[in-house]
Each structure stands twice: as C-alpha cells, then as structure tokens.
Amino acid sequence: MSKDQAIGGAILVVCVLVAVLYIAGMFFYPFIQNYVNIGTEETVRYWLVAVPVLVAFVAILLIGAWIGWTMATTPPPKPIEEITTEMEEKKEEAKTEEPAPASAAPEKKKKSDK
C-alpha cells in the first residue's frame, strides 16, 4: 500500500466516523443521553446544525476573499491589438533576415574507403 492510499484510507475512516457520530447525535441523542449528557436535545441539535453551517459560510467567504485578492493583485493582460501587432512585427523581422548560408559539412569517410 502506498502512502497516498494510506492517507486516503485514513480520510475515509475519519469521514465515516464523523458522519456516524453526526447522525447519532442528530437523530438518536435521546437514546444516548443517558451515556453522554452534554445538554438538552434541542441544544445539541442546534449546535449540530449551527457549527457546520458556520464552517461552510466562513469557507465560502474565504474563497471569495482569495478570489478578490487574486483579482486585485494580478496585473491586467495586454490588449489583443498589442499582441497581434507584436506577432506581425516578429514575422516581418523573420522575413527580412536572410537565411544563414548552409556551410558545406565535410563528408564522412566510409569504412570501406579507409
């Protein structure tokens, strides 16, 4: 098993465990209240909904802030007219330059010529 597979397996186990505990707390809290008493049923259900909503809301705001930061700090691109003008100038320069004369490469002697 590779390192990536082990990490993936650990993430899977943690997510399934959190999901089971969340469902148990949300729907079966009256049955487990005898074992774990952390508040009334209404209080527990409120926090089981409020915390994930808060985390998701803050995550969305952070993503929006990151997009805004990226847009604010990235320089604007060149206008398309400048790019096409530069490309045309490069083509003209390449056409005006004369090709370098091909140098006569010495022929290699064959083994039988030796």
Image (spheres, helix red, strand yellow):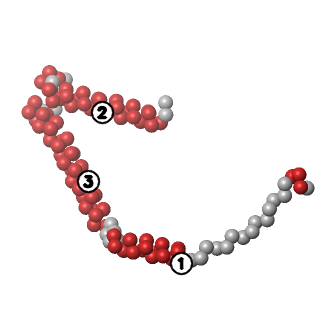
Residue position for label 2: 15
Q: Classify 10 Å Cα crowding around label 2: few (below 14), some (14-19), many (20 and above).
A: few
> Dot 1: within a 10 Å radius of its alpha carbon, few (fewer than 14), some, or many (20 or more) residues?
few
Using the rendered image of the protein, determine whether residue 51 is visible from the camera's viewpoint.
Answer: yes
Residue nearest the viewer, comparing 28 with 90:
90
* Residue that badge 3 annotates: 63
Please name the residue shown 24% across and 49% down the image: 59
Give the farthest residue toward the right: 114
Q: Is residue 65 left or right of residue 31?
A: right
The quadrant holding residue 105 is: bottom right
Separation (CA) of disc 3 from disc 1: 51 Å
| Residue depth check, mark 2 versus mark 1: number of the one nearer the observer | 1
On the image, numbered disc 1 is attached to which residue? 96
In the rendered structure, the answer to whether residue 111 lies left or right of residue 69 reads right
Kind of residue sitting beneath label 2: Cys
Q: The residue tagged with tag 2: helix, strand or loop? A: helix
Q: Secondary structure at mark 3?
A: helix
Label 1 sits on what residue type?
Answer: Thr
The location of residue 16, given as percent across then percent down, is: 29, 29
* Residue at image location 16% in from the left, 32% down from the top: 38
